[in-house]
Image (cartoon, rainbow, N blue to C red):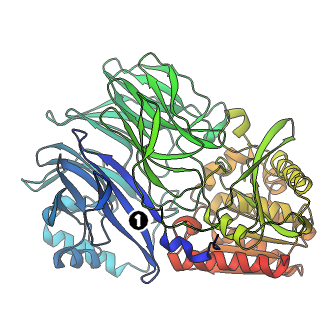
Amino acid sequence: MDKLQRDEFYNYRFLSNLTVSPEKTAVAVTVWQADPKNNSYTSNIWVRKDQGFAQLTAMDKESSFIFDEETTILFAASRDSQDKKKAEAGEPYTAYYRISLTGGEAVKAFTVPLKAIGIWKLDVDLYLIKARTDAGIGDFAAMSEEQREQVLKAKKDNVDYEVFDEIPFWSNGGGFTNKLRNTLYVVDAKAKTCTPITAPLFMTGDVDVKEGKVLYTGEEYTSRPQRKASVYLYDVKAKTTECIYDKKEYSIHEAAFFGEAIVLAAATTTRHGNNENPYLYKLDPVSHEVTLWAPYEYSMGSSVGSDCRYGGGCGFAADEKALYFLTTREDSSHLYKMGACGCIQPVIELTGSVDHFALADGKILFAGMLGQKLQEIYEYDPETKTTTQISDFNEAALTNKYVAVPQRLSVESEGTTINGWVLLPKDYDETKRYPAILDIHGGPKTVYGEVFYHEMQVWANEGYFVFFCNPIGSDGRDNEFADLRGKYGTCDYNNIMDFTDAVLKQYPAIDAQRVGVTGGSYGGFMTNWIIGHTSRFAAAASQRSIANWISFYGVSDIGMTFGPDQQGGNIYDDTEKLWWHSPVKYARACTTPTLFIHSDEDYRCPMAEGLQMYTALVDLGVESKLVYFKGENHELSRSGKPLHRMRRLNEITDWMQSHLK
């Protein structure tokens, strides 16, 4: 088998927005691929043909689409000179094009003076658009040309300034967000009108459309959101909006029409904090009563980690008979369903990850990562209970490459079973001695599973054992297991150390003096924590980390909620507790050579966190290095610019090579 090279991910394809046409006769998907030449990603729409999938668009910039009719796709694009001129001017503007599934040239359908981030078809020439708007300047779509020019000039004149009068004032991946909202508009393409149906300061959340009705969630705020949304119904024909739930009792994760009712995936957050798994509730659109439909102790959605995805798709949808939703159980993500009776049962349970799905005619299509493969499209037949791969987007990418198969290993720790895996190095010979790398996931409420992870496979191909586990605080089990509030750096740390001990015992070929540790986000926090509590690791790479829970509160886009919730204290009354859980407190105990990776636009775990830990170590004479990525955010390892992802992987791998080999 050939060695998997570090830059192999340039050849991988990533799948998003898997969509089935209204009459269920056609299927389309967005296909992404790294473009190192332009340091970006290409994206094109592909459609299902008899023998697989065929490329429909070829401009490398088409990603957001819907089926306009059974054989026609409507997609957003910037293709002609007008589109490009408005984009360069920074004007809120989106152009939509139509293309037939049989091919041919795309034709411009209509344009809107909006920065569209989502679209749904309501009727012929009538659409619902979710747009990113600036409440600070007013309704741009309703302005005259003269007013728009004044707004754009003022924006240009003030490009060097940002004014904050609310929190959070920035968001990871979204930049500065003060007074930015997601606004719903009804767009009449023929009449060329854009009518807002939500208020300027209203932040729209989830949206569903069915038979002339628009269901949406969200809240209006002026200085800070409260995380407890209301639910609304908009009647397209009557042009009226009704608030059908406003008691602010739940954090609403998902909302959808289901039969004559509305189903909410919502959590009170009173039992297990902000990370509490949601229950399924029934909302009666007439009486406005909310009743428990089905308690469910596991999370909804897929939290199985991988660095081989780009974009997402549907994870929660209903037809007339059942609600279908993704759920993470143990270390895989599955598709489950709930009937009108409230009974929940599995539909697709496979080892790996169901990433997103679409309900077809009697069958279910899904994009997934199974059997150490990269993403492909699969078709599940409920009658025969069989799953068939129907695409070959990535079949050639790993051909004749060494792909390590995860070796499962479990250990008893802190009164529970901790599950993890070990990847064997390429050309493994049990009579030889090898270095190893411990990799720690983020979250902490995510999971590792038996899916392809590029960086880990690269390290296995470089001659390392790679091992990883799901400590207390991870997803995949019940609320109790995931509830790490107030315990960061205690039971979770013990779990990881116990797992490390078990790996070294199970695989004596590992040289215990040549073991490194790395991780990002929560994994970065834990890496920082580890180097302050043990000297057993010969090298560390701390990525997008947290070092100080006191500073984190005021600089992270989630600091004011995540910090107090997860650490069980606030900066006004509980600084001793926050400081106790802060890795930088223990910097004097650090001796491990440590690499820090951080990005200047990481507003989740901002630069201040990595800089504090780095500065402390250098000040104390510990060998350290910090690599600062410009123009990147918290998602560097998963969706950063291709050349930046390559540099990151090289920095970590080379750091380990220099200290472990």
| Local SS, label 1 | strand
Camera sees residue 287: yes
State the image coordinates of residue 247 (x, y, percent, origin top left): 46, 28
> Quadrant of the rendered structure where residue 230 is?
top left
Residue at x 43%, y 45% (from the top left corner) = 366
- Pick whichever, 431 or 88, lies toward us: 431
In the rendered image, which residue does mark 1 sit on?
32
132 relative to 194 in the view: left or right:
right
**Quadrant in the picture for the C terminus:** bottom right
Give left or right: position of 411 versus 189.
right
* Crowd around label 1: few <14 · some 14–19 · many ≥20 (10 Å): many
Amino acid type at mark 1: Trp
Q: In the displayed structure, would residue 564 be above or below residue 310?
A: above
Q: Dividing the image into 4 quarters, which one contains the N terminus?
A: bottom right
User: Is residue 200 something one can see in this rendering?
Assistant: no
**Residue 223: image location, x then y, percent:** 48, 52
Residue 575: % across, % down: 79, 54
Whether 584 is drawn above or below 313: the answer is below
Compared with 280, 436 (above or below) is below
At x 76% / y 81%, what residue is drawn? 625
